[in-house]
């Protein structure tokens, strides 16, 4: 007899995924502790949102780097959206 599939303890939304990979050290450490040993899942919608947020941010950064002449220019360009 096959063992019943265990329901995930945590469902990770987009904000948790961002904190998990890009949050400060304390948050990443806390999340690692909670998620240690498995028992977490995420949806394909969250993964699409994650990819969109990360890829959009990387694209904006690369475009800003191409025209910025200083750190201040870079920050100003990124603030414009």
Image (tube, rainbow, N blue to C red):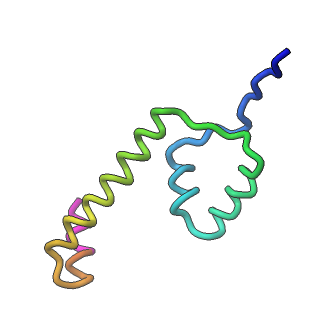
Coordinates of residue 18 in the picture (x, y in percent):
50, 54
Coordinates of residue 78 in the picture (x, y in percent):
25, 67
Kindly give the residue lying farthest to the bottom in the view shown: 70
Coordinates of residue 44 in the picture (x, y in percent):
48, 33
Magenta-tinted stretch: 75-81
12 relative to 31, above or below: above
Q: Quadrant of residue 12?
A: top right
| Main SS class of the magenta portion in the image | helix
Task: Name the residue located 51 percent from the left edge and 62 percent from the top edge.
Answer: 22
Kindly give the residue lying farthest to the top in the view shown: 1
Q: How many marks?
A: 0
Task: Name the residue located 75 percent from the left edge and 52 percent from the top edge.
Answer: 36
| Residue placed most toward the observer, 35 or 26 | 35
Kindly give the residue lying farthest to the left in the view shown: 67
Where's the C terminus, which quadrant?
bottom left
User: Is 53 placed left or right of 64 in the picture?
Assistant: right
Q: Quadrant of residue 69?
A: bottom left
Q: Is residue 29 magenta?
A: no
81 relative to 7, above or below: below
Task: Name the residue located 41 percent from the left edge and 41 percent from the top edge.
Answer: 49
User: Is 49 placed left or right of 20 in the picture?
Assistant: left
Q: Is residue 78 magenta?
A: yes
8 relative to 20, above or below: above
Where's the N terminus, which quadrant?
top right
Kindly give the residue lying farthest to the right in the view shown: 1
Coordinates of residue 54 in the picture (x, y in percent):
38, 54
């Amino acid at each position: 007899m096959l063992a019943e599939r265990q329901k995930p303890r945590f469902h990770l939304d987009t904000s948790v995924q961002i904190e998990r990979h890009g949050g400060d050290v304390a948050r990443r450490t806390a999340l690692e502790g909670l998620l240690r040993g498995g028992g977490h899942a995420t949806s394909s919608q969250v993964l699409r949102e994650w990819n969109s947020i990360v890829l959009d941010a990387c694209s904006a950064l690369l475009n800003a780097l191409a025209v910025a002449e200083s750190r201040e220019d870079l920050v100003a360009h990124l603030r414009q959206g």
